[in-house]
Image (cartoon, rainbow, N blue to C red):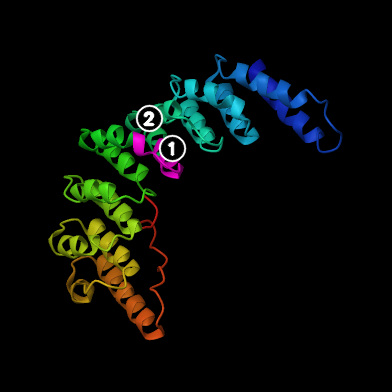
Amino acid sequence: MPSSSVLVLLSLCFASLLGCYQPPATSSPQRTVDTLLRLLHDSDAMARRTAAEALGKIGNPQAIAALVMALGDQSPIVREASVRSLGGLGPLDLVARVHIAGLLIDPVQSVRSAAAQNLASLDSTKELWPLAMSQLAHADPEVRRAVIQAFESIDSPAIVRVLVGSLHDPDPRVRQTAVAVLGESGDSKVVELFREQLKAESSANVRGEIAYRLQFFSEGGFEEELRFVASHDESAQVRRWGDQTLRGLRGARDSGSRPQPIPPAVPEPSHQYP
């Protein structure tokens, strides 16, 4: 039997559907928000998660404070839903961002990823850089990956310098994520780093990511390394990416256009984080 809280949520959804056919009372939207805010404190974690998701879809900034508090919920599904909903509720103050950054070290991977995606989508998180950077030394490699992801859309030489250190992380998945984010930065200085990494890297997944990312740089003089990789790398996947990137660069040069991204393989390497 569904709980009373779930029935309330279902009735709210049903009422919103009826609203397509008849105008609701003026106070109805506010009553809906008030009910959802109360349900964030329900004993049923599923009800709390659904309430958090619904508040995000409604998009009322009034819910920000309550959703920030829900970031500390004991249930990971509620924490994840809350951080995702906050991403669509407009400008967030520093207090809210600090709470979101705190989830970069959450014990649950899906929550960490949601926090990283939220922070990466914000216009500016400069105030949080020291807090996030301090976690690049965290013992858990998944935490380090989440922090690197959070820097994805930040255009800053300081961030590039910090992420360069992650190219030497002991965990290959962390190194691969660092390559992906540095590749997205478009900073021409990373090309030489990628060239050196391509020759010394022990992980085929990281070498494949580098070969894929090099297609975004039209200048750099790295074709010799790519030709070697395309013909001699021990991994068929890496050889394929080296060859495809070379063909893409040659085609772009012949046409006088910028290299166009080649659709990534599934599941790796990828322009998204595996």
Q: What segment carries the magenta color?
A: 114-127
Quick check: is 205 in the magenta stretch?
no
**Closer to us: 227 or 204:** 227
Q: Residue at x 29, y 32 (%)?
A: 131
Where residue 170 appears, x then y in whole percent?
A: 16, 45
Secondary structure mostly seen in magenta is helix
Q: Amino acid at mark 2?
A: Leu
State the mark number for residue 114. Answer: 1
State the mark number for residue 37. Answer: none
> Height in image: 202 above or below 67?
below
Left or right: 79 as drawn, with respect to 190: right
| Label 2 neighbour load within 10 Å: few <14, some 14-19, many 20+ | many
Q: Which residue is mark 2?
A: 103
Asked if disc 2 and disc 1 are in contact, CB closer than 8 Å, the reply is: yes
Where residue 224 appears, x then y in whole percent?
A: 18, 76
Left or right: 147 as drawn, with respect to 195: right
Q: Residue at x 45, y 22 (%)?
A: 75
Q: Residue at x 61, y 16 (%)?
A: 38
